[in-house]
Image (cartoon, helix red, strand yellow):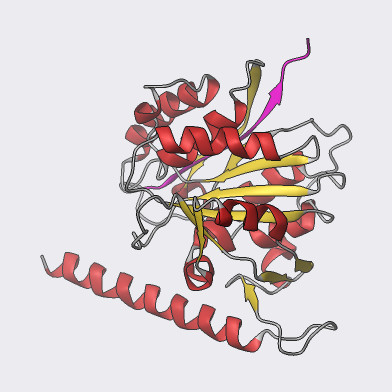
Amino acid sequence: MIKKKTFIIISLLIIATVMVAISFLILNNQKDTHSSNEMFLASVYNNEENYDDVFSKLTKVEVKPKAKAGIVSHHFLAKQMIADFYNTIGNNDISTVFLISPNHYNNFYPTGILAYTSNLTWQTPFGNLLVNSKINNYLIEKKEVKSNDSLLAMEHGIYVEMPFIKKFFPNAKVVPLAVNMGIGYDDFLLLGKEIREISDDKSVLIVSSDFSHDLSIEEAERKDKLSIEVLNNLKDGELSEANNDCRQCLAVLQGFLSDNQSYDFNLIDNKNSFDFSDYKEETVTSYVSGYYTFKEE
């Protein structure tokens, strides 16, 4: 009981520290050639030195896959795995990245709102990452999405990905969505289809998600195999078999890919937190990364 209380207290302190750090970044990162009064968002990991060790290990991908969508972790502990994912699918020709993330803080959503977003620019160590405000505003005007700058700033499912997106999709704008995890899958299937309709050939959808939580390595590996089977063949009624932190995100992914054209899921990696740290082999978080390509006719 004492250990449990200590763990809860430490967890709350960590969350509070992160929130304060992010708030500081939002208020102080206001350096821009266009306007000294413009507000920005920024990742907690916003120093280029945070990435030097993993980027130095990357190898050049000679032939880039024509990835239409992908899934990757948002635990910075797994930053080498995250870097490998983006290095594999990164593309200078992509103009819009749709980033779909869980809402880890269970924030209140007004009735009918499927996700929160923000039109604020993200400062990264690799340059400013602009938001595709045209698409964002379209979704906001349809009352499916609502702007919430503070939530996006706190959501690690969003801010962990932003520097990687800017680094490996240097010419892209982003549409960040932290989804409402309190409602069923059907609305998110429709949202995914709508995103597909308003996107083009220079768009990619990325789901930011982690998989098994607080399980032994053996149990996590068993559940990950089932989750990868779901990712291999996304179907209605089977999303609940995936053991990840955002099945609603998978519903968006399924809707985005369901245009009667068959696709392949290409697994890049499947690891867990013990692979990156020797802390608690009995209670790991697992990670799955991969991308989708449409089959050639």
The residues colored magenta run 284-297
Of residue 246 and residue 89, the one placed in the foreground of this image is: 246
- Name the quadrant of the N terminus: bottom left
Q: Quadrant of residue 295?
A: top right
Q: Main secondary structure of the magenta part?
A: strand
- Residue pictured at 42% horizontal, 80% vertical: 17
Q: Residue at x 54, y 53 (%)?
A: 177
Residue 203: image location, x then y, percent: 75, 41
Please, which residue is most extreme toward the top here? 297
Q: Is residue 282 left or right of residue 229?
A: left
Q: Residue at x 49, y 73 (%)?
A: 150
Question: Which residue is pictured at 40% across the width and 28% down the height?
Answer: 239
Question: In the rendering, at what x and y percent does residue 273 appear?
Answer: 46, 50
Does residue 11 lie above or below 189 as drawn?
below
Q: Quadrant of residue 19 in the image?
A: bottom left
Residue 40 in sight here: yes
**Residue 118: % across, % down:** 58, 65
| Residue 56 percent across, percent down from the top left | 78, 56
